[in-house]
Amino acid sequence: MDMKTRIERTLDTAVCRAANGKAPPMIAEAIRYAVFPGGARVRPRLCLAVAAACGDDAPEVSEGAAAAIELLHCASLVHDDLPCFDDAALRRGRPSVHAAYGEATALLAGDALIVLAFQVVAEAAQRNPARTAPLVTLVASSVGLPLGIVAGQAWESEPTVPLEAYHGAKTGALFVGAAAAGAVAAGSDPAPWRRLGERLGAAYQVADDLRDGLCEPEEIGKPVGQDPAHLRPNALQQLGARGAVARLESLIAGAIGAIPRCPGAAELEALIASEAKRLMPKKLTRSAA
Amino acid sequence: MDMKTRIERTLDTAVCRAANGKAPPMIAEAIRYAVFPGGARVRPRLCLAVAAACGDDAPEVSEGAAAAIELLHCASLVHDDLPCFDDAALRRGRPSVHAAYGEATALLAGDALIVLAFQVVAEAAQRNPARTAPLVTLVASSVGLPLGIVAGQAWESEPTVPLEAYHGAKTGALFVGAAAAGAVAAGSDPAPWRRLGERLGAAYQVADDLRDGLCEPEEIGKPVGQDPAHLRPNALQQLGARGAVARLESLIAGAIGAIPRCPGAAELEALIASEAKRLMPKKLTRSAA
């Protein structure tokens, strides 16, 4: 079964169980709306690709880990779009969750997705009990305090922001979590995979900054110009378009260079290269052509 | 070591690790503020009391489970107090988390507490790997969809509310989770303990309804009259004061009757009786005297 099918199927099973007939109907609809149709699913793909490179001896565990990472990503988008943060009415080309279902339901939908993530990864690992606690704690640390994505978002409320810590937490942490969880799910040491996650996370941050400044809302399905509007640091402003693109390319090369020697290295490299292409704003690929 | 010390120490260790010097300072302060000083800690006490009744052969596991349950309870209070729900400026006799730290930080503090809960319970159980997945999934199901406390809160946004499902989810689920987690943490079957949790949860709901209608804000440290203000079903309105007190007493008796035969039964009974006394609004105990 291909990676995309494994991810969608695991997510669907998880959402179906949480959002069944016993749940309040509106939040049940809202969590499905928050998860489907998805974006590029790049974090769970990274997780499964690393698991494959490590032998993937327990596919249900790596699928559970990948789904958990994606559910947490979806939860973070739902909460980040809320009025007290980005106040974004648009996400993936349609109304954001709170625009569609109201603020109260959106807030609870994010909470429910966080809880569901831990439920999914723990259940998936229950027949490999030695992997359960390491996976749950690893996933938790990539989301919570002091260094996970919640911390990244919280830095935006501070009067002074240490840039590296901010970016590392806001974007990098869940990429590192995805890569490391893929290794742990396959019974391998996560340490050699962290660097790959860090580089990819940093590349994503730069790509996101470029898209915020150079794309039209239709191209990326969400409002643009959010970083200057919220006074957030942005690579485009700091380095200019040419400098930011060079930085993105160097980070992608660094990510590829950080792939440990392993059987699945070529596949991982292809995944990263195709992501790099997808991430570049059309405006820049056209002008480069 | 007594139960209270075990609970406070485990919570403190958890909060210290999440809210360390690497975390954004304001959210670090906010999660400590949300957890300390606590309320009655009744859910973690129930968890530890059930674990004790089951032999408590791995105290670090029961302490982790108890702390996780309390962190999730604290998270739910932080989120329920937010403007899109109760908009409560007061909690435990001082400003609620969003009143003290702003809405964005309060929302993220709730998220961080949810994540921390799963981290704490998984780490505590890592030397008892066979208990990890059952504990994490049990704790998750008492919070998430379809039947946990998030579902309970979400019912308040629905046009029609099935009363039993609403109360069972909003208050009962975490009591059931606390009792069942205490058993699982001690390597026992949780099934015989669920009924105790259900009865206690229902008793708490009635007590809370009475306090909302009959207490002064100073007595309970939070705004009163919230149920009629938010059009929520309330036992006081449905049964009158005398009827609601009779219902509370019958639920407490039912909870005591639901304690399975076990070595710690007398202690559990004493805990429940003392809680019952604490829960009764002063106005009613005075008039009864």
Image (spheres, coloured by chain):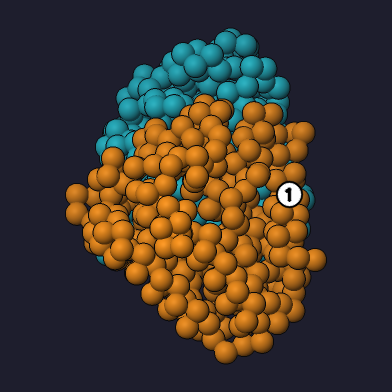
Chain colours: A orange, B cyan
The residue marked by circle 1 belongs to what chain?
Answer: A
Residue B253 percent across, percent down from the top left: 67, 32
Query: Mark 1: which secondary structure?
Result: helix
Q: Residue furthest right?
A: A1
Label 1 crowd bin: few (<14), some (14–19), many (20+), radius 10 Å = some
Task: Left or right? Give the position of A175 relative to A163.
Answer: right
Residue A27 percent across, percent down from the top left: 62, 33
Picture mark count:
1
Name the residue: 54% across, 14% down.
Answer: B231
For the residue pair B138 and B79, the one nearer the viewer reads as B79
- Residue B27 vs A109, above or below: the answer is below
- Residue A240 vs A192, above or below: the answer is above
For the residue pair A157 and B80, the one nearer the viewer reads as A157
For the residue pair B100 and B261, the one nearer the viewer reads as B100
Task: Left or right? Give the position of B209 relative to A166.
Answer: right
Q: Which image quadrant for residue A105?
A: top right
Name the residue: 67% across, 35% down.
Answer: A28
Residue at which label 1 appears: A12
Task: Left or right? Give the position of B198 relative to A243.
Answer: right
Q: Is residue B26 visible?
A: no
Q: Type of residue at label 1? A: Asp
Residue A55 percent across, percent down from the top left: 70, 82
Viewport quadrant of the N terminus of chain A:
bottom right
Residue A77 percent across, percent down from the top left: 49, 46
Q: Which residue lies furthest to the bottom in this view?
A: A261
Name the residue: 77% across, 33% down.
Answer: A21
Q: Which residue lies furthest to the front in this view?
A: A289
Q: Is residue A116 visible?
A: yes
Name the residue: 49% across, 16% down.
Answer: B230
